[in-house]
Image (cartoon, rainbow, N blue to C red):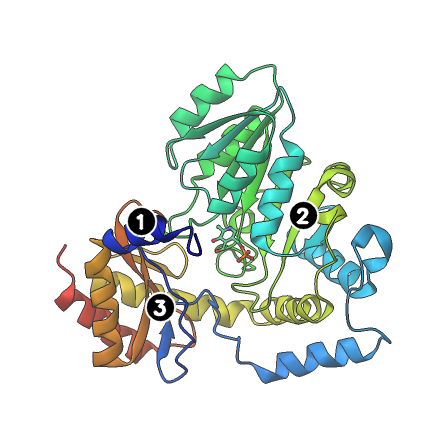
């Protein structure tokens, strides 16, 4: 039995779901990654992060935050995030995946009810499996279904988990869902992986977009690996919830503190976003307009989902676009999505002419 998973791997190959890592081909135009603002290659920011690091004798986190790993670089970024987003307290965490698991496992206790949107990210679903409370997945973006569950759970501590912009569908959480959570005094987790840095007057995400002031029951989780072109995550909340997470979230207690370089880089990214918000917003709007005009798709952010349906066909189309146009578009298959999609990311690094060309080609090869 040297290859104990042969049966499973063969089943994946048969159904067209087999995955492989491929080293990034730098010669292709990147219309697949989540580096929305297109700044992952900005060497100036990289040098600034190095300068920040060079001010300190150490450049590695060395230990858990609760042992000796909490560094002034972490604290400064947390304070800047709180300031920018109107929250009382922040904790930087290892990654968005790790943050969702840690958060949900810690927050949802025995006797509590977790109401999670059925399209919530796999990391949240993994956290839900680990928690001790009752877990209910409500239909995607359906306020009336959520209302029914909130009424049913009356009297219990309720945690609602939704995304600002959904990672695959690219759609926004409706304002009504946020308002329902507020009205029912539920704890509200907002996963802002794809909305932070992309929407809102100050590009701070979904609360900024709807002009909602954070309440003591709101928790904003953001990743640093997307618009913030770094790696890691953060959780913003009330001081009370933050105090609780520091005492209960296993990913904070039992893990080495986040990388200092990545935290410093994300801090410079935040400053960049704040100082360039107007121009960035205009560039985002220009790309949304092109996608709307050519593909007829209204994008809340910069994710453009193009439903193909078949797992093998989506891979074939991805290859076709690479060969014909030198463009790399994401190909997302089941079980990540119900129906396979091409996931075009209208990153700001792609100029408008090229984006229009890709959209035009898509209209020719995409059978709606
Ligand atoms: C909605 C959502 N939440 C969380 C994560 C995980 O974040 P990270 O990549 O920082 O681990 C992702 C990543 O793809 C995501 O799309």
Residue pictured at 20% horizontal, 53% vertical: 310
Q: Is residue 332 above or below residue 211?
A: below
- Please indicate whether residue 333 sits to the left or right of residue 147 in the image: left
Local SS, label 1: loop
Q: Position of residue 18 (x, y in %)?
A: 32, 57
Residue labelled with disc 3: 287
Is the Cβ of the residue at disc 2 closer than 8 Å to that at disc 1? no
Disc with the residue nearer the chain's start (2 vs 3)? 2
Disc with the residue nearer the chain's start (2 vs 1)? 2
Q: Residue 147 carries which label?
A: none
- Please indicate whether residue 10 sits to the left or right of residue 123 in the image: left
Disc with the residue nearer the chain's start (3 vs 1)? 3
Is the Cβ of the residue at disc 2 closer than 8 Å to that at disc 3? no
Frontmost of labels 2 and 3 is 2
Residue pictured at 62% horizontal, 19% vertical: 111
Q: Which mark is residue 334?
A: 1
Of residues 78 and 285, the one drawn nearer to the viewer in this rendering: 78
Frontmost of labels 2 and 1 is 1
């Amino acid at each position: 039995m040297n290859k104990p998973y042969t049966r499973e791997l063969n089943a994946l190959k048969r159904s067209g779901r087999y995955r492989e890592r491929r080293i990034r081909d730098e010669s292709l135009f990147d219309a697949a990654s989540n580096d929305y603002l297109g700044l992952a290659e900005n060497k100036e920011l990289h040098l600034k992060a190095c300068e920040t690091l060079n001010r300190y004798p150490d450049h590695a986190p060395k230990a858990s935050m609760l042992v000796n790993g909490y560094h002034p670089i972490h604290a400064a970024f947390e304070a800047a995030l709180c300031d920018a987003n109107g929250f009382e307290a922040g904790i930087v965490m290892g990654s968005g995946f790790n943050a969702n698991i840690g958060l949900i496992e810690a927050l949802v206790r025995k006797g509590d009810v977790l109401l999670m949107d059925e399209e919530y990210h796999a990391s949240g679903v993994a956290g839900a499996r680990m928690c001790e409370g009752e877990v209910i997945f409500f239909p995607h973006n359906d306020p009336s279904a959520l209302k029914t569950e909130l009424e049913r759970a009356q009297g219990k501590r309720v945690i609602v988990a939704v995304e600002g912009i959904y990672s695959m569908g690219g759609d926004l959480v409706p304002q009504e869902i946020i308002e329902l959570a507020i009205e029912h005094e539920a704890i509200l987790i907002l996963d802002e992986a794809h909305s932070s840095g992309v929407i809102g007057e100050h590009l701070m995400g979904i609360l900024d977009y709807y002009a909602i002031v954070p309440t003591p029951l709101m928790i904003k989780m953001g990743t640093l690996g997307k618009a913030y072109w770094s790696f890691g995550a953060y959780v913003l909340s009330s001081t009370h919830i933050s105090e609780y997470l520091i005492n209960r979230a296993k990913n904070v207690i039992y893990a080495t503190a986040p990388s200092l370089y990545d935290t410093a880089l994300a801090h410079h990214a935040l400053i960049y976003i704040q100082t360039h918000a107007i121009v960035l917003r205009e560039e985002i709007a220009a790309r949304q307009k092109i996608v709307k005009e050519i593909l007829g798709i209204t994008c809340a952010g910069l994710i453009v989902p193009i439903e193909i349906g078949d797992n093998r066909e989506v891979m074939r189309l991805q290859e076709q676009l690479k060969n014909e146009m030198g463009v790399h578009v994401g190909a997302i298959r089941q079980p990540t999505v119900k129906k396979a999609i091409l996931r075009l990311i209208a990153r700001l690094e792609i100029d408008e002419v090229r984006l229009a060309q890709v959209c035009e080609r898509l209209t020719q090869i995409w059978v709606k």
